[in-house]
Amino acid sequence: MPSLASIRHPLASPEKQLETLVRTGTPEFETVLADHGLDPLDARRIEVLQVNVGKLCNQTCAHCHVDAGPDRREAMTHGTAEQVVELLTRHPIPTLDITGGAPELNPEFRFLVEAGRRLGRRVIDRCNLTVLVLPSQGDLVPFLARHRVEVIASLPSFRPTGTDAQRGEGVFAKSIDALRRLNDAGYGTGGDLVLNLVHNPVGAFLPGSQVSLERDYRRELRERHSVVFDRLLTIANMPISRFLEFLERTGNTRRYMDLLLRTFNPAAAAGVMCRTHLSVGWDGTLYDCDFNQMLDLPVDHGAPPTLRALLAAGDLSRRVRTDRHCLGCTAGAGSSCGGSLQ
């Protein structure tokens, strides 16, 4: 199998990507749900407001469902960030989850962190780790620690070859440097500075047991690199964006979709994150999840389509919009931004 990091070419449009999944012969996700008495999916309460502040990133990872990179210019404005804060002010959503791109590179990142903490919310930074060692971000770790921001950091493998194959040459070494800086600041040591790592497979298969992988990560990182962390979260690779392009290039699309369908887990489907999350795009458009956002599938079924409209309407409940890629969240032990669902 070729290195994932070697695959670099323009992505198909969201419409073409969805057409690709249709060609695999995979049934509609709503049909699969209905067969198990789970249709439709409703979001009746919002526990996490996940805000994508833009696609600018200092890396260009082969698995990235956001298609982020150094050349992307999509970025949240201060006006939209203020609407996010207004939504949090009006509604007791417990968690503000900030993502990107590398969210820390957006000027509104620190504004959102400070506002979220001032409102008493749990604030999460979805971090690629290498941003922490950029010369321009020398004060970033102290900033995160000062505001008690929970860091969820991507580290696909505890082996250099695995991480570098997916994220680029030299990324593992930089990630270890960043993890040591976080540890030195008190992160991952069992206190109130939480450091969780994220594993996703380097290839067209599902993640292994989250419990077993966490044990392996903990042993390898501690013994080889003197690095500690709180929890490991396992996330399946979603069949969209760059990962779908990888599947197409390697002839694995149908096999992967068949794997997702064959391992569909009704218990995981009942607990998918879109039932408790609301995703905000960099321009204020609303989505049921970050994956729908990347496929340009905004909320539907009469739900307010933008932050501005939601602020005017006030009702956070909605019916979730689904498609075939949703099988990625319901396969095996299930997958969410919070890790395995079982």
Image (cartoon, helix red, strand yellow):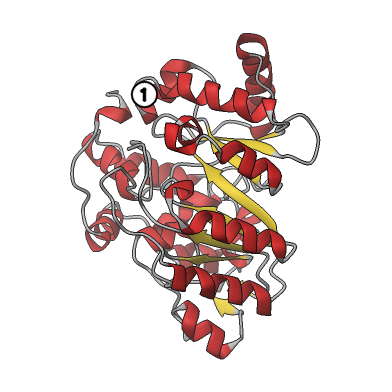
In this figure, which residue is indicated by the disc labeled 1?
Answer: 165
Q: Nearer the viewer, residue 322 or 339?
A: 339
Task: Please say whether residue 27 is visible from this viewpoint.
Answer: no
The extreme left residue here reads: 10
Is residue 60 toward the left or the right of residue 50 in the image? left
- Residue 151's spot in the image, x, y percent? 62, 42
Q: Give the answer, above or below, for where 85 lies relative to 153.
A: below
Q: Residues within 10 Å of mark 1 (few under 14, many from 20)?
A: many
Q: Nearer the viewer, residue 39 or 222?
A: 222
- Residue 202's spot in the image, x, y percent? 42, 29
The extreme bottom residue here reads: 313
Is residue 151 toward the left or the right of residue 169 in the image? right
Q: Nearer the viewer, residue 161 or 181?
A: 181
Q: Give the answer, above or below, for where 175 lies relative to 341.
A: above
Q: Give the answer, above or below, for where 146 lies relative to 32.
A: above
> Could you tell me which residue is drawn at 44 percent across and 42 percent down?
237
